[in-house]
């Protein structure tokens, strides 16, 4: 097929249709009428010889062909947008840009403070707007409304760029007055009471069920592998709260090391850490961003800084 005969606007329409999965919403976003959007969908179906979107009980559902096309479309349109935009300079010292970062509580408590320290020295006018996973959807990231998402992800859209920030092992955080320290092993660990902490996914969370091992996460899945369970006394979604609760002499928080060890720094800390008495699969913290922002000079600078700050944090924790 001769590309000169193709209306490239149709690719823009298809990109929005696949994102919204609704003809009316897609028309509103593009500023055209609903009949014009319906006509464009008919032309797209002829162009690709595929229905692309099929009406089901769940709404408009993409076909397999459409799902295969979506990441290719995003890459093509991103390249076109980059080509037609004027090159924008980015001055680190003078920029007043606000970067919006979706960060899990784990990332916010471990990475963001060190990142802010670096930014304060080299980019004094730049500001960070840190959002929680409940504030953001993948569509917000894809559209560039959020600069980046830093979290543990089980799934990411194929169109996203991503990089591993670090890999973190688990450790047990507890009071120096916890009697378990006299004989810390698997049996004493299982006999103790525990603090559960996690909330990594996108969207609004729900209450926890202590018997739902699959949803409890890495620690309890690791115990299930050896056919054991622990006694969870309290559930929290905040790592800072877990550390405060761990000061009680009868509670243990099993956390990623980067979220735990900083609470043991200094002679006056009431807390200490111990390696878990059973193997737990490490976690991977990732940074993901939209292809729309991939070549943005300011965004590129911040991504590189985050990776460098993360590297320094890991090196310091080894000491």
Image: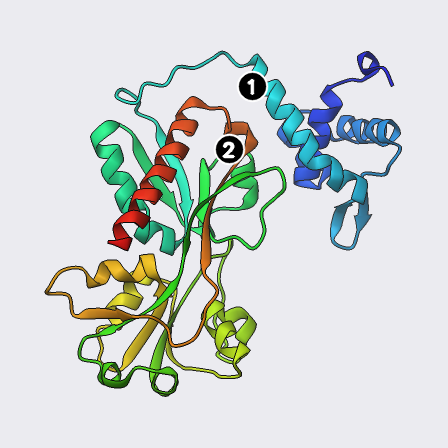
First reached walking from the N terminus: tag 1 or tag 2: 1
- From the image, tell me which residue sits under label 1: 82
> What residue is at 29 percent from the left and 43 percent from the top?
312
> What residue is at 43 percent from the left and 82 percent from the top?
230
Q: Is residue 134 left or right of residue 21?
A: left
Residue 96, percent across and down? Answer: 30, 25
Residue 306, percent across and down? Answer: 36, 38
> What residue is at 89 percent from the left and 32 percent from the top?
49
**Residue projecting furthest to the left:** 268
**Residue projecting furthest to the front:** 319
Along the viewing direction, whichever of 279 and 74 lies nearer the viewer: 279
- Which of labels 1 and 2 is toward the front? 1
Residue 63 visible (yes or no): no
Residue 41, percent across and down? Answer: 80, 31
Q: Which mark is residue 170?
A: none
Name the image quarter holding the C terminus.
Answer: bottom left
- From the image, tell me which residue sits under label 2: 144
Residue 239, percent across and down? Answer: 33, 62
21, above or below 274, in the image: above
Q: Residues within 10 Å of mark 1 (few under 14, many from 20)?
A: some
Q: How is the image coloured?
A: rainbow
168, above or below 14, in the image: below
């Amino acid at each position: 097929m001769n590309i000169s005969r193709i209306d490239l606007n149709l690719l823009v329409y298809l990109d929005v249709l696949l994102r919204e999965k609704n003809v009316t919403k897609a028309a509103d976003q593009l500023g055209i009428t609903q009949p014009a959007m319906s006509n464009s969908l008919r032309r797209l179906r002829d162009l690709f010889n595929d229905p692309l979107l099929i009406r089901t009980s769940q709404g408009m559902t993409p076909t397999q062909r459409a799902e295969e096309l979506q990441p290719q479309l995003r890459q093509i349109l991103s390249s076109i947008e980059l080509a037609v935009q004027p090159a924008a300079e980015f001055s680190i010292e003078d920029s007043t840009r606000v970067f919006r970062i979706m960060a899990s509580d784990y990332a916010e408590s471990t990475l963001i403070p060190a990142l802010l320290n670096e930014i304060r020295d080299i980019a004094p006018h730049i500001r960070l707007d840190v959002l929680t996973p409940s504030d953001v959807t993948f569509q917000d990231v894809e559209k560039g409304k959020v600069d980046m998402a830093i979290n543990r992800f089980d799934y990411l859209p194929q169109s996203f760029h991503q990089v591993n920030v670090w890999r973190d092992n688990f450790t047990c955080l507890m009071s120096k007055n916890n009697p378990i320290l006299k004989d810390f092993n698997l049996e004493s660990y299982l006999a103790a009471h525990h603090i559960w902490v996690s909330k990594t996914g996108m969207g609004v969370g729900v209450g926890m069920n202590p018997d739902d091992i699959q949803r409890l996460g890495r620690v309890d899945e690791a115990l299930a592998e050896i056919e054991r369970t622990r006694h969870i006394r309290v559930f929290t979604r905040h790592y800072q709260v877990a550390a405060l609760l761990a000061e009680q002499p009868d509670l243990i928080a099993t956390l990623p090391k980067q979220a735990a060890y900083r609470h043991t720094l200094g002679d006056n800390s009431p807390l200490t850490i111990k390696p878990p008495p059973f193997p737990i699969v490490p976690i991977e913290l990732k940074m993901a961003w939209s292809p729309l922002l991939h070549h943005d000079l300011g965004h590129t600078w911040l991504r590189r800084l985050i990776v460098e700050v993360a590297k320094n944090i890991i090196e310091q924790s080894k000491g």
